[in-house]
Each structure stands twice: as C-alpha cells, then as structure tokens.
Image (tube, grey):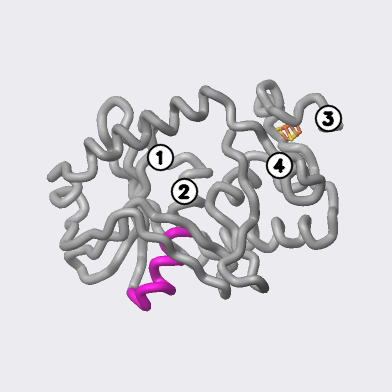
Amino acid sequence: MIETQMLSDTETTPMLTPSEVIEHVFCPRFTWFMNVQKISQHEDSRYKVLKGREVHARRETENKAYLRRKIGVAAKELSVYLASPSLRMRGVVDEVLTLSDSTMAPLDYKYTEHQGTAFKTHRIQVLMYAMLVRESYDAAVTRGYVAYIRGSHQVVEVPLSQGAEAEVLGIVDDIFEIIGTGRLPKRTAHTVRCRDCCYGNICV
Ligand code: SF4
C-alpha cells in the first residue's frame, strides 16, 4: 500500500488526494491510523511492482487511437496537477480530455483487468478528478473514464451525477470529521480485507 499524507497547497487549506480517499473507502480505519494515530503504511514491494507496471503500460497506451475513436477525444493534456481548496481535493490526473461534444473529462489508467464495471475505488477516484476538472477549467463535465490496461484494454465511462458528487463529498466530509475529532471509525464490513492489512496486528 502507498504511504499517504494529507498535504496542503496553502498553509491553511488541507486537501485530500484520491489515494487518501480510496484508502478510506477500502477501510475507514486507514484514515484513523494514518491521520489520527500518525502510523504510516509501509509501501510493500508488491505495490511498487504494480505501480511500475502501471506506468510502463500507461506510456504504451497513451497514444493509442482507440481512445480517440471510442470516446471522441479532440484534445488532451497529460499528467495535470489540479487542486481545489473549496472541494478540499487535489491530485494529478493522468489525462484531461476535451471531447468532441465540447465537454471535458478526466481519464485515469489502471493496470488491472476489466471486470465489467469500474471498481468502487476507481469510480470514486475518477469522480474526484471530474469535479476538479470542472472547477479548474470552468468547463462542462458530465463523466470521467477509467482505462483498464491489463489484458484486453477497456475504457469504462463513469457518469458524474448529482448523486455521485454527493457520495464523494460525503466521503470527504467523513474523513475530515475523523481527523478533526479523532473518532475511531468502524472496521470495514469486508473482513477479507483484514487478511493482508498492515494494521492487522494493532486493529482491535
Ligand atoms: S485490519 Fe481490517 S478493519 Fe483494521 S484497518 Fe485493516 S482492513 Fe481495516
């Protein structure tokens, strides 16, 4: 797992990264261990290997024409840093796309096999990027994309609905509430996630 740390672009406005948010989605206690107890995760070798493959596969995929055909890309920017004090989010988007319908959308690469729909963690991450793109570019943003680049390449569309935005903002609120109060959140309901957890020995 990646070591995360809440950083700020200004000295007064903390902003969450997608990594921090998706770790909270995986298990809310990650937020508590990292940001209340200040116990970092160790970045294990399996994660480093996976990340290296992701970067390599992404570079090979970036210029594939299938993207332009499939989702109508008119222009794109690569590796764009975006931050919003009002949304309390920041992050580096793999690609910011301008689409043929004049809307904009983020695209995020995942070195994972496609399994029908976007994983919840990936969906939340690309929704955060979509909200950041909309605010930063003052553009219409109705969706984001996750490109699964392991095995057969698949691009999954993630709609940016009012409900989806409320879900993301609710997670951000929950994280700041835990950090602000020190409240110990419930354990994840998915006990299978505890098997390889780096906090397993101290999580009671
Ligand atoms: S051991 Fe389970 S409940 Fe505790 S932090 Fe890890 S995943 Fe969450």
* Residue 178 part of the magenta segment: no
Pinpoint residue 171: horizontal percent, then vertical percent: 64, 57
Residue 13, placed above or below residue 56: below
For the residues labelled 4 and 3, say whether their Cβ atoms are less than 8 Å apart.
no
Q: How far, Cα to Cα, is label 2 from label 3?
A: 30 Å
Dot 2: what SS? Answer: helix
Would you name the residue on which mark 1 appears? 117
| Total marks in image | 4
Magenta-highlighted residues: 128-139
Q: Residues within 10 Å of mark 2 (few under 14, many from 20)?
A: many
Q: Residues within 10 Å of mark 4 (few under 14, many from 20)?
A: many
The answer to whether 37 appears left or right of 86 in the picture is: right
Would you name the residue on which mark 3 appears? 202
Q: Which numbered disc, 2 or 4, marks the residue that appears first in the sequence? A: 4
Three-letter code, disc 2 = Arg
Q: Which numbered disc, 1 or 3, marks the residue that appears first in the sequence? A: 1
The answer to whether 119 appears left or right of 31 in the picture is: left
Three-letter code, disc 4 = Phe
Three-letter code, disc 1 = Thr
Which tag is nearer the camera, tag 2 or tag 1? 2
Pinpoint residue 143: horizontal percent, then vertical percent: 36, 60
Q: Which numbered disc, 2 or 3, marks the residue that appears first in the sequence? A: 2
Q: Residue at x 82, y 32 (%)?
A: 203
> Quarter-wise, where is residue 151 in the image?
top left
> Quarter of the image containing the N terminus?
top right
* Between 77 and 150, the one nearer to me in the picture: 77
Q: How far, Cα to Cα, is label 2 from label 4?
A: 19 Å
